[in-house]
Image: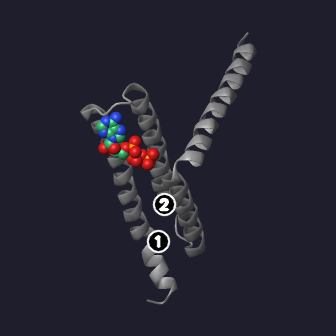
Amino acid sequence: MRSDGSALNLRRWWRSAGFAWAGLAFAFRTQANFRIELVCAALAGLAALWLNVPGAPVLLACALVLALELMNTAVEAVVDLVSPDVHPLAKVAKDASAAAVLLACLGALLVAGVTLLPALLARLGL
Ligand SMILES: Nc1ncnc2c1ncn2[C@@H]1O[C@H](COP(=O)(O)OP(=O)(O)OP(=O)(O)O)[C@@H](O)[C@H]1O
């Protein structure tokens, strides 16, 4: 009985992971900003490796940016669905969602500045 439940849960988890992957693929295909942020995250991760600094803060900051970009994509889709015409509340939703991404980007830049920049300057002998 219990093992049946676990097997079902695993199947459900695998199904949910497939839906999440579809969301990622959609954002990658349609959102230029998501692709740019993904490249920046990869570069930041590689820089952390190269400079031998802890990568976790940098990668967490990048994950936050990418996650909020995905939420922004979701908000845009829902707003376009329920309010195809111009509406002040639709504007609030889209603008606040975009602001969340912007704030996370500024935070990620700050984290990169604190963790990567000193190590980079030291590596360059500056
Ligand atoms: N239905 C709407 N009603 C009012 N204002 C809107 C509406 N749709 C979009 N806007 C305004 O136009 C801006 C841009 O909207 P758009 O849907 O093009 O988003 P975007 O940020 O350009 O998305 P993308 O990431 O796809 O480029 C929004 O931030 C908002 O200020």
Q: Which mark is residue 70?
A: none
Tell me where residue 93 sits by quadrant.
top left
Instruction: Assess disc 2: are there few (<14), some (14-19) or many (≥20) residues with their C-alpha within 10 Å of its C-alpha.
Output: many
Whether residue 94 is visible:
no
The relative height of residue 67 versus residue 51 in the rendered view (above or below) is: above
Give the SS element for disc 2: helix
Give the SS element for disc 1: helix
To which residue does mark 2 refer? Answer: 58
> In this view, which residue lies farthest toward the front?
85
Residue 20 location in percent, x, y?
60, 35
Front residue (pair 2, 92): 92
To which residue does mark 1 refer? Answer: 116
Q: In 3D space, how far apart are the residues under numbered discs 1 and 2 (Cα atoms)?
A: 8 Å
The relative height of residue 117 versus residue 90 in the rendered view (above or below) is: below
Q: Residue at x 27, y 32 (%)?
A: 89
Residue 101 location in percent, x, y?
39, 49
Q: Residue at x 71, y 24 (%)?
A: 11
Instruction: Assess disc 1: are there few (<14), some (14-19) or many (≥20) residues with their C-alpha within 10 Å of its C-alpha.
Output: many
Tell me where residue 88 sits by quadrant.
top left
Q: Quadrant of the N terminus?
A: top right
The relative height of residue 76 versus residue 7 in the rendered view (above or below) is: below
Cβ–Cβ under 8 Å for marks 1 and 2:
yes
Q: Amino acid at mark 1?
A: Leu
The relative height of residue 91 versus residue 7 in the rendered view (above or below) is: below
Name the colouring of the figure. Answer: one colour
Ligand 1 image-quadrant field: top left
